[in-house]
Amino acid sequence: MLVSVMLVNNETGVIQPIEEIGQLAHEAGALFMTDATQAVGKLPINVDKSNIDLLTFSGHKFYGPKGVGGLFVRQRRPHKVKLEALLHGGGHERGLRSGTLNVPGIVGIGKAAELARLEMVKETRRVASLRDQLETALLTIPGTHVNGNREHRLYSTTNIYFENCDSDALIMGLEGMAVSNGSACTAASIDPSHVLLAMGLNETEAFSCLRFSLGRFNTEADVVATVEAIKGVVEELRALV
C-alpha cells in the first residue's frame, strides 16, 4: 500500500503537512511518497524527519538542466522500498533503469542543488519580499483574493482570483509576461483547474484566477511592471461586462 501526497501544490504553493501524513501512512502499514518537485531547492527537506520513503524532484525547478530529475528510495528498514525495473537491459542504476547515463545532466543537477542550498536563505527572503509586494498591490484591485492558505505556502508563489475577468483574456493582454491559469502539467487542458474546484470555487471563478511564480531572476521592477499591466487589463475587461 502506498500513500502519495504532493509536498508543495504547484498551483497555489500551499505546503502540505507531510510529516504528519507520513506518520499516519506508516501507522496504517503503508509506504509514503511525496512529489517534491516544487519544493526541492527551495525548502529544506529531511526525509527521515518527514517519514518519506520515496521522493521525486526535477532539476529545472531549481535552475538545473531540463529533462533531469531524481528519485529518493528508502533503503533502510522498517520501511525499506523495493522497486521493480521499468527498463530492462544492461542493469544500470542498480538494475532499475537500463540505458546510458546522462552524465552532463547528472553533474548539472548536482551543481544546481549545491548552489540552491548555499543561496536558499538569501533567496527565500528576497523572493518572498517580491511576492508579497506583488500580492499586496494586486489585492488593492476590488474583487480579488488569494486562493489557498497564506501562511503555509511556498514563498515564491501566489494564486489570485480576479472577479469578472476571464484568465485567458487576462493572459492575452499581458504582453511580455509569463503567468498561468493552471499548472504546466495541464497546459493542454481546456477544463478549469481541478485544484481550485476542489477548494470550493465554481467553474466561473476557477476560470478567473492567475498563478504567479517568482524566482532568482525577478526584480522589483518586474513586480511594478506586472502590477501596472494587470490593473490596466482588468479595468479593460471589466468595462466590457
Image (cartoon, rainbow, N blue to C red):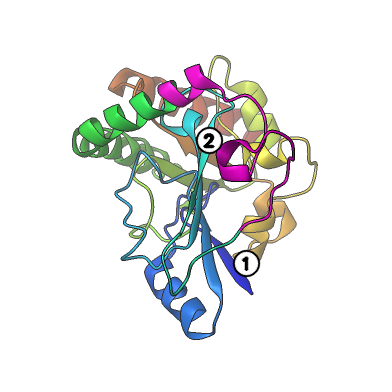
As shown in the figure, which amino acid type bears the numbered disc 2? Gly
Closer to the observer: label 1 or label 2?
2
**Name of the residue lying farthest toward the top:** 176
Segment colored magenta:
83-107
How packed mark 2 is, by other alpha carbons closer than 10 Å (few <14, some 14-19, many 20 or more), is: some
Q: Residue 172 colored magenta?
A: no
How packed mark 1 is, by other alpha carbons closer than 10 Å (few <14, some 14-19, many 20 or more), is: few
Q: Is residue 17 visible?
A: no
| Image point (58%, 61%), residue name | 82
| Image point (63%, 28%), residue name | 171
Badge 2 marks a residue whose secondary structure is strand
Residue 132: quarter of image: top left
Quadrant of the image containing the N terminus: bottom right
**Name of the residue lying farthest toward the bottom:** 28
**Name of the residue lying farthest toward the right:** 190
Q: Position of residue 118 (x, y in %)?
A: 21, 32
Q: Position of residue 163 (x, y in %)?
A: 59, 48
Mark identifier at residue 91 = none
Q: Of callouts 1 and 2, which one flags the residue occurring earlier in the amino acid sequence? A: 2
| Image point (47%, 85%), residue name | 27
Q: Which residue is mark 1?
A: 200
Q: Position of residue 193 (x, y in %)?
A: 68, 51
As shown in the figure, which amino acid type bears the numbered disc 1? Gly
Task: Considering the whole magenta stretch, tell me its main secondary structure.
Answer: loop
Badge 1 marks a residue whose secondary structure is loop
Mark identifier at residue 69 = 2
